Image: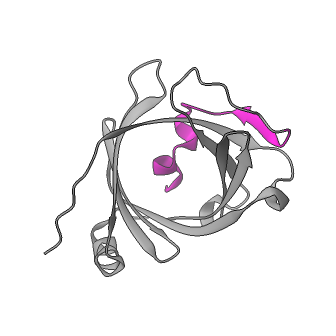
Amino acid sequence: MLIFTIKMATETERKFLVKGEFMQLSVRETEIEQYYLTKDHEKTIRLRIADETAYLTVKGRPAPGMIGRDEWEFEIPLSDAKEMIKLCLPGTIVKTRYHIPAGKHVYEVDVFHSKNEGLILAEIELENEDEYFEKPEWLGAEVTGDPAYYNSNLVK
C-alpha cells in the first residue's frame, strides 16, 4: 500500500497565445495526455500522463479578480492511471509541451493535437501575481482567466 503526503500549493499562472517561432528555443519536450475525473465551477480533478509518468491533480478555482488558485498534485503509478482512465469523463487533451527558458522563468508551451489541432498556448508560473517576467517576441495575446482556454474546457 502506497501512502502519499500531499502538500497544498498555490498556482499562480499567466497564459498567452503564441504568435511566432519558439521550438528552436526549447530545452525539453514532453508528450502529454490529460483526462478529467470531474470538473465543475469550483474544482477540477485531472489525470495526466506525461511521457511515462502519471499525476493526479486537484485544482480549485481562482477567487474573483485573482489568478492564483489552490492546487494539489502528486505522482501515481502509471498502471493505476491507466485503470483510472476508465472512470474519467469523455474526451482527452493531447499535446506536446515545450519547455523554454526566459530570464529566471521557464515557459511551458503546449502545442495541441487531435480536436484542438492548431492551438498553441504558453504558460508561465509565477511566485505572485505582480511578479515581473520577460515576454519573448513570440508571445501573443494574454488569455489568462479566459475560460475558453482552460484545458478542462478544451477537452470538449
Residue 144 vertical placement versus 65 (above, below): below
Residue 89 vertical placement versus 40 (above, below): below
At a point 32% along the width and 81% down the height, the residue shown is 79
The extreme front residue here reads: 104
Please tell me whether residue 55 belongs to the stretch shown in magenta: no
**Front residue (pair 17, 130):** 130
At a point 38% along the width and 63% down the height, the residue shown is 55
At a point 72% along the width and 52% down the height, the residue shown is 100
Q: Where is residue 35 in the image (x, y as percent from the top left)?
A: 41, 63
**Front residue (pair 46, 109):** 109
The colour scheme used here is one colour
At a point 49% along the width and 56% down the height, the residue shown is 155
The extreme left residue here reads: 1
Q: Position of residue 106 (x, y in %)?
A: 65, 47
Please tell me whether residue 155 belongs to the stretch shown in magenta: yes
Q: Quadrant of residue 131?
A: top right
122 lies left or right of 54 = right
Q: What stretch is highlighted in magenta?
A: 137-156
Residue 133 vertical placement versus 106 (above, below): above
36 lies left or right of 125 = left
Any part of residue 146 in sight:
yes
Q: Position of residue 32 (x, y in %)?
A: 54, 67
Q: Where is residue 88 in the image (x, y as percent from the top left)?
A: 32, 65
Any part of residue 58 in sight:
no
